[in-house]
Image (cartoon, helix red, strand yellow):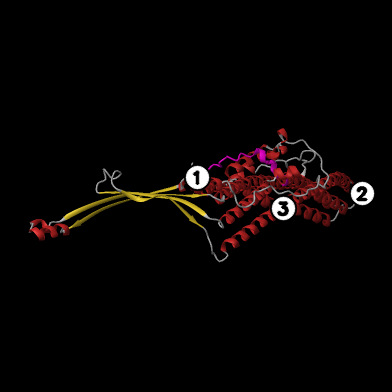
Amino acid sequence: MRRGPAAMTVWAAAVLTACNVGHDYRKPDIALPADFAEPHASPPLPAGSDISKWWTVFHDTKLDSLIARALAANLDLQAAASRVRQAREQEIIAGAPEWPSLDVSGLGVNMHSNSNPLAALAGGAGGSPAAGSPSNIKLYSLGLDASWEIDLFGGTRRAMEAAHANTEAALWDLHDGEVALTAEIADDYINLRASQARIAMLDSEIGDELQLFGLVRDRARAGFVTQLDVNQQRTLLENARAEIPPLQAQADAMVHAIAVLLAQPPESLARELETAEPIPVTPPGLPAALPAELLRRRPDIREAERKLAAATADEGVAIADLYPKLDLIGSPAFTGGMLSNLLSASHFGTVGIAYVSWPIFEAGRLRANIRASKEAELQAYFAWKKAVLGALQDVEDALARYADEKSHERALAATEEAAASSQTIARQQYATGLVTFVNVLTAEATLLSTRDALIQSRAALTEDLSTIYKALGGGWDEASVDWERHPPDPENK
């Protein structure tokens, strides 16, 4: 059976559309150590060993509430969600050339003349009085313009691949923002509770110093000690009082920061968070994860990998511009003097035209675009590799800080116990006249600084654990992501 030119064109297009220029994307790989260098232990994790809600290990209901509200209202997350929706629309735009395009055009003309030239000619020959009578001519036209660019070499399909990869990258960016947000809320909350704990410690210390001040003043009045002891104790007392305002300012700043992260005015949480509560307690041990698990959990790594996939597909789009383009064009049109019978009137136009174009000379633009696309792909690969190595460094650094701070906290706890005992002994001996007030001042100052350092160390320990969970990616893994999820539009646009 012989095929006509149109059938041959369609057959050739069907064969060629199976071709995709450029190379198919493969996920990159990198040699990684079998385990982290820093020592760590496996702790009890949140329910089901899911660290996507890692902050629940602290068992702090207030922190849980703040993070839940921040995830729902944070402005940065809303912007990231908007970028996901935008990327999904770009997928539709990239895939549109796969379908034919159809335009409709219409024209209506009403021509009026005070004289009819044709009738004038007829009247001139026969002397008819209608030779100069006016005339109206109506003309209507309806046209359809259809075109379809056949994706012979896969340029459109590569563009669709790039757009889909960019959508996935935007979704991973959203999840990375969630990880960063939860860690920031936790850090601010820990710092708030640490400042409140230090203020409470100073308030308690001021009470003790006031009692001691009364004792020293009574001994001075009795002539057992000089006014020097009174002045020294007053100095210690006032120094303790002077440390409170900066700590209160720091606590207020943390409240303001948390409120803004919740997309609320800075002072909106002042009453809710003004009551001092303990610093969240760290659970025993640390979360353990091999580097392979880390790669699945870090949203920023997955985002970088998806951007590499998009850059690889973009190279294919650039290569496709070197090859011929085939457009199928149809432009039927209908004309008539009445709207009612327009479609049955005479028609003219073109139907079934195959238009082929092939760039011959572009002054090197197309090949330069291909080379630029290759460089963009190479840059995306370097960015992915840097993200992987940076993630490993983040975990190693966090584990090292946590281990060192744990040792520091244990040493401070032992120091605080010894300093408290020394303070008691010094006060007792001073009351009986066995030692000078210098011994008491030294013991008081040592205990105060040790207790303050211990509070800060315990806060740093909790914050370091938060950093570890953040470094592990907050628990996100590829299997847990709903790729079809459309982030809600807060403006309901």
**Disc 3 and disc 2: Cα gap in Å?**
68 Å
341 horizontally vs 39: left or right = left
* Segment colored magenta: 471-493
**Which residue in the protein does label 2 denote?**
434
Q: Residues within 10 Å of mark 2 (few under 14, many from 20)?
A: few
* Residue at 63% across, 52% down: 312
Amino acid type shown at disc 3? Lys
Could you tell me residue 88's position as x and y percent?
A: 54, 46
Q: Looking at the picture, which amino acid does disc 2 mark?
A: Leu
Using a 10 Å C-alpha cutoff, classify the residue at mark 3 as few (fewer than 14 neighbours), some (14 to 19) or many (20 or more).
some
Query: Quick one: 419 or 132, which is closer to the camera?
Result: 132
Label 2–label 1 contact, CB within 8 A: no
Answer left or right for 378 relative to 429: left
Camera-side residue of 48 and 123: 123
Assess whether residue 477 is covered by the magenta stretch. yes
Report the number of discs.
3
Q: Is residue 141 visible?
A: yes
Percent coordinates x, y for residue 300 in the rendering = 67, 49
Q: Give whichever of 182, 397 is nearer the camera.
A: 397
Residue 136: x and y, percent? 19, 53
Say which mark, if any, is on residue 64. none
Q: Which residue is mark 3?
A: 385
Q: Nearer the viewer, residue 105 or 256?
A: 105
